[in-house]
Amino acid sequence: MEGADVSAEARQPQVDTDVTKIGTEPAGGAVAAGAKLIENSDCTTCHRLNEKIIGPAYEAVAEKYPDTDANVTMLAKKVISGGSGNWGQIAMTPHPNLSEKDAEAMVRYILSLK
């Protein structure tokens, strides 16, 4: 852009949910909804797409857990209830106001990142 003085820092995305992949997976609807829910949540305070912050990177979660209905249910319950132990002793904040359906959509997005 001619005449625009935009620094590289100003162009950095606040949330890295790799939105270029949204809708390209077989479960596009649920995956896209999950990505949007994560983008609008506090999840990115502790998690990033491909780097460990406080909690594991989303890609590391996708590598550890196969995309099965049982894992989606288990991880969604973990997102809602919080806790520690699976990735170390730092506890994940519970999200009790998150519906099971929304938590499952978020997990489906994360597990699609293989």
Image (cartoon, rainbow, N blue to C red):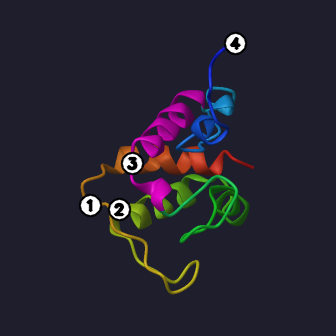
**Corner quadrant of residue 59:** bottom right
Q: Which of the two discs, 3 and 4, labels the residue nearer the N terminus?
A: 4
Q: Which of the two discs, 1 and 2, labels the residue nearer the N terminus?
A: 2
CA–CA distance in space, label 4 to label 1: 48 Å
As helix, strand or loop, the secondary structure at mark 2 comes to: helix
Mark number, residue 2: 4
Choose mark 4 or mark 1, whichever is in front.
Answer: 4
The N terminus: image quadrant: top right
Q: Position of residue 95 (x, y in %)?
A: 32, 60
Kind of residue sitting beneath label 1 = Pro
Say left or right for 29 vs 67.
Answer: left
Q: Are marks 2 and 4 in contact (CB under 8 Å)?
A: no
Q: Which class describes the residues within 10 Å of circle 2: few (<14), some (14-19), or many (20+)? A: many
Say left or right for 114 vs 19.
Answer: right
Residue at image position (67%, 38%) is 8
As helix, strand or loop, the secondary structure at mark 3 comes to: loop
As helix, strand or loop, the secondary structure at mark 4 comes to: loop
As helix, strand or loop, the secondary structure at mark 1 comes to: loop
Kind of residue sitting beneath label 4 = Glu
Choose mark 1 or mark 3, whichever is in front.
Answer: 3
CA–CA distance in space, label 1 to label 2: 5 Å
Mark number, residue 39: none
Q: Residue furthest top?
A: 2
Q: Which class describes the residues within 10 Å of circle 4: few (<14), some (14-19), or many (20+)? A: few
Q: Which residues are magenta?
A: 28-45
Q: Which of the two discs, 2 and 3, labels the residue nearer the N terminus?
A: 3
Choose mark 2 or mark 3, whichever is in front.
Answer: 3
